[in-house]
Structure formats: structure tokens, C-alpha cells
């Protein structure tokens, strides 16, 4: 599969490194309207660069990694789909559910695959926990707790340029930053029937929220909570607690999974050593899931099947967050459609 990367900002390096490690994927070049970003990518990786992504497609890209600001995802994805190009989109899928639907419908109509990068689903400890849940090792799930804390300085204006606006990012700590932790909670606990919550901007001075909290009811009857903030003094924390009638599991960042069973047995899985690979340098909170995401996406294109995390799966996570935002817009925390 010949892969191009559109957007050479913060996250594109993960896609480059993954492409160099996944068999059957050939990276053919980059596209970015920012000439400085494009020049840096071309010089670092020695591949062609284009200021127009259509030229990247003309150069042979069969699939594209979309690493653009969120508000640009929908229009570029729809255009690529109509050109017969498969799309692997960074999270979140779009800034609105309407745009997410446009992307899904365009890819369906064109017969191309739409994958979304929720790479934490592919981290080793996440996969182990999912298998334990599916095997009934935790018993009936009763409560899922998602905590996300991140310290961002209000003075970091450059970082929040487009990320600080609703139009540019779609949302703040829930939609952009803590979304990986929220997505894992839903991936592990199942479909949500009700969502109620609040968001607030307490310290950042941005249009988007820096703090959010919510309570969920899952279709299984289990309950869940979400607590996320960018205003914490903690540098970074992403933690899940999944409580079942037979065992409880704690998932910390991408490095540790601990399971405590009702009969006293415990098991711990740690993966920090895997983060030292010089071919894919990363941090423990991020993990190396981009490699598995791209490998699955390439296999999906080759086999003509949806990726493990496709547009519809990503839309379900976005819908839960959107329902919380809608409550805030209406000024009440009532039952919201999910």
C-alpha cells in the first residue's frame, strides 16, 4: 500500500515511524500548505513534498494519513474518497457529527476504507484487558471510571491557536485531549444509552473547555464516570478503573495493567520496556499503538474489510461527547440522546 501523509504538524512523525515498520506499506511523500513544516519533513525523511495534497495523490498515494487540524478533516476526506483514496484519519473524526456522517457516507459511496487513529485500543495492556472482559474474567461489569489529567499552561498561546476554538478543534479536554481515555472506556464497557455532564473553562482562557465531568449509563445497565481536565498540576495522567463482580482492573497510561480478583489473586502487566525501541521513540502515556493501527488499516485495504477502528466506531465515541456539549449549550444536565 502506497501511503501519503497530509499534514506535517505534531503527530505526523508517529505515522512516518509506523510506516517504516509495517511490512507492505510504502511511504511516498508528504503534503502541507505550511511550507516550513513541509520543508522540515522533506529534509528529515528524504521524501517528496507537495503543497497541494492532490499532487500527492497524483504521485501515487493509494491511501492517506490525515494529520490535519480537526476542522479540515471532513472536506479533505470527502475529496480524497471521491478520488478513490483510502483515508486513515487522526482523532477525532471531525468537529461535528454532521461532518463525521459526511466522511462515512463519502467513503461508503466510493468503496474506500475509513480508519480512525484511536491507537490506545491497540496497546498491549488494552488488548489484554479487552480479552479478559470478553472471557468473563471480570464477571458482570458494574462501573467504569475514566480519569484524565494534563497540565497545560494558559500562556501557551501557540499550542492553543486552533485547538482553543470550537470551530477549529470541535471541543477541548473531552473532544481533543481526554478523548483517548473516553474512547477506551466505551470500547471496554460497551454502548452508551444515556450521558449527562458538565464542562467548564476555569483557567485556560480558551473558547473550548479545559475541564469536564460526566456520568454514563451503558446499555448493559452498568454505570460510568468521566473526569477530565487540562488545569491540573499533574503533568499527565490517563487512568481507567473497570469494576466487575469477579475482578477489578486498573489501566494506567500505556504502561501498566493491574487486575485484582475477588478470590485474592492478582496479576500485573507492564510494558514500559517496549517504549525504548529507537525505531519508534515515544512516551509511556502514548504507547506504540500507531504501528498496530497502520498494520490493521493496511490489511483492511488489502482484504476489502473495515478497519478495526472505522468511522462508525469513532463516531460512537464522538456522539457521547457531543451529547455532553449539547447539554451545556442548552444550559442543563438532562438525559441526552446518544
Image (spheres, rainbow, N blue to C red):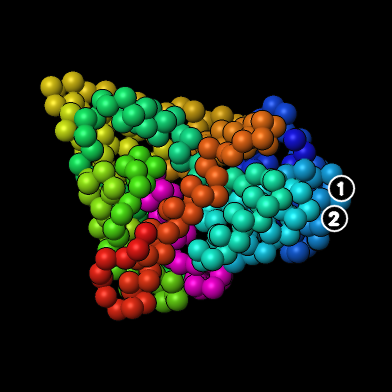
Tell me which segment is drawn in magenta.
Answer: 158-184
Above or below, comparing residue 226 to residue 3 in the picture: below
Task: Name the foreground residue: 12 vs 129.
Answer: 129
- For label 2, the residue is 55
Above or below, comparing residue 236 to residue 261 in the picture: below
Residue 284 is at least partly visible in this image? no
Above or below, comparing residue 50 to residue 303 in the picture: below
- For label 1, the residue is 59
C-beta proximity under 8 Å, tags 1 and 2? yes
* Quadrant assignment, res 310: top right
- In the rendered image, residue 146, in percent from the top left (x then y), is placed at 30, 49
- In the rendered image, residue 67, in percent from the top left (x then y), is placed at 64, 54
Give SS at disc 1: loop
Q: Name the outermost residue toward the left.
A: 263
- In the rendered image, residue 44, in percent from the top left (x then y), is placed at 75, 45
Q: Is residue 162 magenta?
A: yes
Quarter of the picture holding the N terminus: top right
Q: Is residue 314 magenta?
A: no
Real-space Cα separation, disc 1 to disc 2, in angstroms:
6 Å
Residue for point 55% across, 60% down: 100
* Quadrant assignment, res 179: bottom left
Task: Name the foreground residue: 32 vs 198.
Answer: 198
Answer with left or right where residue 216 lies relative to residue 182. Answer: left
CA neighbours of label 1 inside 10 A, class few (<14), some (14 to 19), many (20+): some
Quarter of the picture holding the C terminus: bottom left
- In the rendered image, residue 319, in percent from the top left (x then y), is placed at 42, 59
Instruction: Please tell me the numbered disc located at residue 133.
Output: none
Q: Name the outermost residue toward the front.
A: 109
Residue for point 51% across, 50% down: 312
Amino acid at each position: 500500500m502506497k501511503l501519503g501523509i497530509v499534514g506535517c504538524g505534531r503527530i505526523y512523525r508517529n505515522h512516518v515511524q509506523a510506516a517504516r515498520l509495517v511490512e507492505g506499506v510504502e511511504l511516498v511523500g508528504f503534503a502541507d500548505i505550511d511550507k516550513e513544516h513541509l520543508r522540515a519533513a522533506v529534509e528529515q525523511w528524504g521524501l517528496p513534498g507537495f503543497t497541494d495534497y492532490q499532487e500527492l495523490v497524483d504521485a501515487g498515494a493509494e491511501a492517506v494519513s490525515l494529520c490535519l487540524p480537526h476542522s479540515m478533516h471532513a472536506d479533505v476526506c470527502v475529496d480524497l474518497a471521491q478520488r478513490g483514496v483510502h483515508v486513515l484519519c487522526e482523532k477525532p473524526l471531525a468537529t461535528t457529527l454532521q461532518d463525521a456522517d459526511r466522511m462515512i457516507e463519502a467513503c461508503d459511496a466510493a468503496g474506500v476504507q475509513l480508519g480512525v487513529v484511536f491507537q490506545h485500543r491497540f496497546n498491549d495492556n488494552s488488548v489484554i484487558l479487552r480479552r479478559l472482559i470478553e472471557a468473563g474474567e471480570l464477571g458482570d461489569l458494574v462501573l467504569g471510571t475514566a480519569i484524565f489529567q494534563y497540565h497545560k499552561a494558559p500562556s501557551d498561546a501557540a499550542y492553543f491557536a486552533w485547538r482553543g476554538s470550537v470551530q477549529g478543534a470541535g471541543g477541548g479536554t473531552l473532544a481533543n485531549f481526554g478523548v483517548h481515555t473516553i474512547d477506551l472506556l466505551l470500547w471496554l464497557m460497551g454502548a452508551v444509552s444515556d450521558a449527562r455532564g458538565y464542562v467548564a473553562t476555569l483557567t485556560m482562557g480558551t473558547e473550548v473547555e479545559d475541564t469536564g465531568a460526566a456520568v454514563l449509563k451503558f446499555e448493559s445497565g452498568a454505570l460510568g464516570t468521566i473526569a477530565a481536565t487540562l488545569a491540573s498540576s499533574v503533568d499527565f495522567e490517563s487512568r481507567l478503573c473497570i469494576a466487575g463482580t469477579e475482578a477489578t482492573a486498573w489501566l494506567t497510561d500505556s504502561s501498566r495493567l493491574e487486575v485484582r480478583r475477588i478470590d485474592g489473586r492478582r496479576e500485573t502487566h507492564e510494558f514500559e520496556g517496549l517504549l525504548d525501541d529507537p525505531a519508534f521513540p515515544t512516551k509511556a502515556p502514548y504507547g506504540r499503538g500507531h504501528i498496530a493501527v497502520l498494520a490493521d488499516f493496511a490489511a483492511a485495504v488489502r482484504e476489502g474489510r473495515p478497519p478495526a477502528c472505522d468511522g462508525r466506531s469513532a463516531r460512537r465515541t464522538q456522539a457521547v461527547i457531543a451529547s455532553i456539549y449539547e447539554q451545556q449549550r442548552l444550559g442543563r444536565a438532562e438525559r441526552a440522546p446518544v
